[in-house]
Image: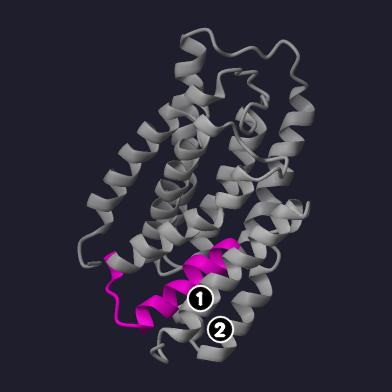
């Protein structure tokens, strides 16, 4: 194995392997945590700079894009679902829902910056760039690997597992989300920006829409259609936004 590729391949195999083993053993709630030591160890091994990893603030305008992305997806899905009579909030405790939304969003932002974003769009991004891949190939590769890392969570009996028909939709959405957050990381140079978007997404998606066949605060039952991560309309909206990001951010970032 080429010495430049050795840490990259090793990190990918360990991340997917450890997470899959934890998902298969009933520890899915904690399966993202091993990404933190892997992130730190491989960063130390390859001695990347803070800037290469993406630990920089980035321009302020990118934070607006970071928040706008999940807000736009959730708003479009919510409005369309309401217009077709799919929303039922008769049993929703909105005080509890808002507390959950902000708590989940805030904890996700802090958590993903040193786990999912730190590993995939921090160290792995820098590692792939170090092999000679250009920005576009690095963006696609990190997004596909990000998707592959999620396979065990939705295909094994984890509590987050999905009906078979929803797994391909979820994995396609995971890839598109990875590209969107990768575009934000590429344009801003910052995993802080990508982590903000990721955290806001988690807070909104899981509180309002639930996950899989579990309903959220909006009371939408047919999540396979309306879910931002597991629904076919989620795929379409994510695809439109990703294409828009691609066209807007690609100049000078090939």
Residue 199 or residue 219, whichever sits in front: 219
| Label 2 sits on residue | 43
Report the disc number at residue 123.
Answer: 1
Name the residue located 44 percent from the left edge and 35 percent from the top edge. 72
Range of the magenta residues?
A: 116-136
User: How are the residues colored?
Assistant: one colour
**Which SS class for mark 2?**
helix
Q: Look at the image and say whether residue 216 sits in the magenta stretch.
A: no
Looking at the image, is 53 positioned above or below residue 86? Answer: below
Residue 63 or residue 208, whichever sits in front: 208
Q: Residue 237: where, in percent of width, then height?
A: 38, 33
Lower sequence index among marks 2 and 1? 2
Q: Look at the image and say whether residue 117 sits in the magenta stretch.
A: yes
Neighbor class of circle 1 (other Cα within 10 Å; few <14, some 14-19, many 20+) is: many
Task: Please state, as top left, top right, bottom left or bottom right, where the C terminus lies in the image.
Answer: bottom left
- What kind of secondary structure does the magenta stretch mostly adopt? helix
């Amino acid at each position: 194995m080429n010495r430049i590729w050795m840490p990259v391949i090793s990190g990918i195999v360990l991340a997917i392997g450890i997470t899959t083993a934890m998902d298969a053993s009933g520890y899915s709630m904690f399966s993202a945590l091993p990404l933190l030591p892997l992130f730190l160890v491989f960063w130390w091994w390859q001695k990347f700079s803070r800037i290469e990893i993406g630990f920089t603030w980035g321009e302020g305008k990118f934070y607006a894009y970071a928040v706008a992305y999940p807000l736009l997806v959730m708003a479009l899905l919510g409005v369309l679902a309401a217009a077709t009579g799919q929303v039922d909030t008769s049993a929703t405790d909105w005080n509890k829902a808002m507390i959950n939304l902000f708590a989940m969003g805030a904890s996700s932002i802090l958590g993903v910056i040193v786990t999912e974003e730190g590993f995939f769009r921090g160290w792995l991004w820098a590692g792939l760039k170090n092999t000679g891949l250009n920005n576009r190939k690095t963006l696609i590769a990190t997004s596909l690997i990000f998707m592959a890392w999620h396979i065990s969570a939705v295909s094994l009996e984890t509590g987050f597992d999905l009906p078979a028909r929803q797994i391909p939709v979820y994995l396609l959405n995971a890839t598109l989300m990875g590209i969107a957050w990768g575009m934000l990381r590429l344009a801003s140079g910052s995993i802080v920006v990508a982590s903000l978007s990721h955290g806001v997404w988690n807070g909104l998606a899981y509180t309002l829409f639930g996950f899989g066949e579990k309903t959220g605060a909006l009371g939408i039952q047919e999540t396979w259609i309306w879910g931002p991560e597991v629904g076919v309309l989620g795929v379409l909206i994510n695809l439109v936004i990703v294409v828009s990001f691609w066209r807007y951010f690609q100049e000078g970032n090939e």
